[in-house]
Amino acid sequence: MAEEIIEAPMVGKIIDVMVKAGDSVAEGDVVCTLESMKMENPLVAPVDGTVKEIKVAAGDTVQAGDEIAVIE
C-alpha cells in the first residue's frame, strides 16, 4: 500500500497532536497543530487512510521538511 508522508511546511513548534498510530483519518482531517510566528497552522491529512506512524509530540520543535506523520 502506498504511504503518504506529512512534512512540516515551516520551522515551528508542535503544540498539539490529534491522532495516534492506528487511527483512521479522512482527507482534510487535522493531524497536528504547528505554531510558527505566533500563528497556529493545522497540518491536515492529504489522503484517506490509517496513521502508520507519528514522528512528533507536543512541544517538539521542527524544521521545514521534517517528517510529521506517515499515512497508508
Image (cartoon, rainbow, N blue to C red):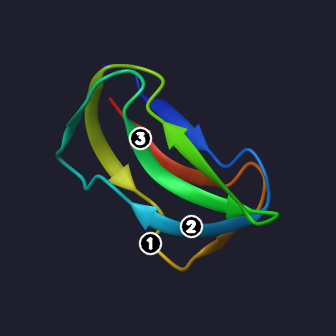
The x, y position of residue 22, in whole percent, is 17, 46
Residue type at mark 3: give it. Answer: Val
- Marks 2 and 1, the one that precedes in the sequence: 2
Circle 3 residue: 30
Mark closest to the chain's N terminus, 1 or 3: 3
Residues at marks 2 and 3, CA–CA distance in whole angstroms: 13 Å
Closer-to-camera residue (60/71): 60
User: Could you say which disc has been placed on residue 14 in the image?
Assistant: 2
Q: Is residue 26 left or right of residue 4?
A: left
Q: Which quadrant does the N terminus fall into?
A: top left
Residue 61 occupies quadrant: bottom right
- Closest to the camera, between mark 2 and mark 1, is 2
Check disc 2 and report its element: helix, strand or loop.
Answer: strand
Q: Secondary structure at mark 1?
A: loop
The first of marks 2 and 3 along the sequence is 2
Helix, strand or loop at mark 3: strand
| Residue at screen point 52% across, 36% down | 5
| Residue at numbered disc 1 | 57
Where residue 11 sits in the image (x, y, percent)? 79, 61
Kindly check if marks 1 and 3 are in contact, taking CB atoms under 8 A apart as contact.
no
Residue neighbourhood size for the residue with mark 1, other residues' Cα within 10 Å, grouped as few (<14), some (14–19), many (≥20): some
Q: Nearer the viewer, residue 22 or 45?
A: 45
The Cα atoms of the two marked residues, 2 and 1, are separated by: 7 Å
What amino acid does circle 2 point to?
Answer: Ile
Marks 2 & 1, CB-CB < 8 Å contact = yes
